[in-house]
Every structure is written in C-alpha cells, then in structure tokens.
Image: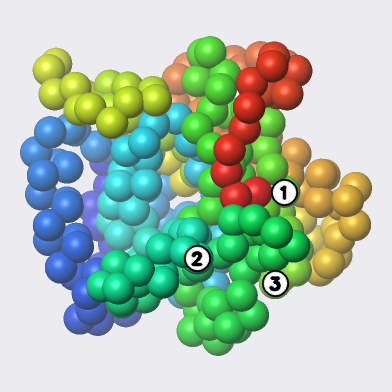
Amino acid sequence: MAERRRRRGTETRRPSLLWLFAALLIPPLKGVATIRIRDGHKVPATGAFILSPNHMSNIDPVVMGYAVWHAGRAPRFLAKASLFRIPVVGSLLHGIGQIPVERGGAARGALPLSAAKRLIEEGQGVIVYPEGSLTRDPDLWPMRGKTGAARLALELGLPVVPAAHWGVQGLMPVNSTRFTLSPRPSIDVVFGDPVDLADLGRVGDRAALNEATDRIMAAITRLEEGLRGETAPPERWDPSKHGQSETGRF
C-alpha cells in the first residue's frame, strides 16, 4: 500500500528553495504516473545518512527525490563540481543543498571536507547511486557496484539505507530522455533497513570497500526482487566482462 507522507522532521517543513522545486516538480510527476512508496519510515527521521538506490532510467533522480521528500527528508545528490562554477546554476544547486564532487584527477569522487562536515553537523542525507551509472544489465537488475557509497559510509561513519524502484522504465525508457505517458505507468519505491557495515571499521582498505559494496548491492537487489516478484541472477552484471564502457563518478 502507498503510505501517507510522514509529518515529522524539519527539513521539509522549513521554508527553503527546495519548496519551490517540490512545487514545480511533484504535481506534474504525480499527474503522469502512479507512485506507490513502501516503508518510508525506514528513512531516518533525523541525522546524517546515505541513501543508495538502484539506477535504471534518467528519470530516477526525480522519482527518488520525490520519495525521499515524501518520507520527510530533503533530497540531496552528488553533482559535478564544474556545475557549481556556472553562474546562476551554481547558486541554485547550492541553494537546494546539492553537493559538489570532482569527476577527474586525484580528487575523482572525493567529497569536499566542508560538505562532509556539513552532512554530519547538520544531520543531512545524501543520495548516492552505488552503480555509478544506469544499469547495463539487459533485464534491468542492479549491476556490479562501485565503491563510492561504501567509501563515504566507512570514512564518515554514516548508515547506508538501501532503496529500490520498479516501473520508472515505463515513464522514461532506459537510455532515453523522452516520456512515455500512455498507458499511465505505475512506479513502486521501497526503502530497506540500514546495511550492517559495523564490522568493517571507519576507514577500510580495498577488501573492506569491496565487501561493503557487495553488501549494499545485495540489499538493493533483495528489495528489487521483492518489487518484481522475481529472483535476480546469481551473478551481478559486470560491464567490463561484456565489452561495455562505464561512466559515473565512482
């Protein structure tokens, strides 16, 4: 069943530029698709956290942003640092709390110290796609993950909340930027319990990062299986084994 929006927390009650974006984006989204959100109470009501969903369509950030807002928290994403240097665009991104990361060089994927401190001190959440790009799996299952979400979780000591959705491909097909409005698509979003990474320490080595990533991807896949009523392949799709290039900051 779809859930009522939780009336708690201050992020969605406090006036901000995000209110404007919510007012502009949510009504059209709800007008073109039926969105059902499950277990929104598993999104922490307060405090810093990382949300890690699957990624299959270019419309995913809008849908997940709505789901997080519905759960009572402000949606924040990692965005290319270069965007923040564009006049007006950069101000808007800062105004709605988005977080800059570098795309190349030694700082690739690094979260600025100021942003990390803000997440913790102000108890903010951030949405990180652990696959790093749209899934290449031909059946749209979560593919092999990158270590970005795991690295942030271990370095900052933050909980990772897995999430999954299914049906977004009916609104915007994979690798497309065009909407499909008929028949009216139905989208299901579900949140899971935090992934247990406590035994891996605060700052892990490569083995710890890989293990943490595997646990995060396994949690996302289990949620996806529940939404689809199917069992995922025993081995996650690895683009490098199929001659496919990968893009993404992590």
Q: Nearer the viewer, residue 184 or 20?
A: 20
Does 84 sit above or below residue 182? below
Amino acid type of disc 1? Thr
Q: Label 1 belongs to which residue? A: 147
Q: At which x and y percent is residue 90?
A: 35, 71
Q: Of the numbered discs in the image, which one, if any, rests on residue 156?
A: 3
Is residue 181 something one can see in this rendering?
yes
Q: Earlier in the sequence, mark 2 or mark 3?
A: 2
Q: Label 2 belongs to which residue? A: 81
Does 76 sit above or below residue 65? below
Does residue 43 appear left or right of residue 143 in this picture? left
Q: Earlier in the sequence, mark 1 or mark 2?
A: 2
**Element carrying mark 2:** helix
Q: Nearer the viewer, residue 203 or 8?
A: 203
**Element carrying mark 3:** helix
Image quadrant assignment for residue 95: bottom left
Q: At which x and y percent is residue 164?
A: 47, 37
Amino acid type of disc 2? Ala
Q: At which x and y percent is residue 25?
A: 17, 52
Q: Residue at the spot x=56%, y=22% of the render?
A: 136
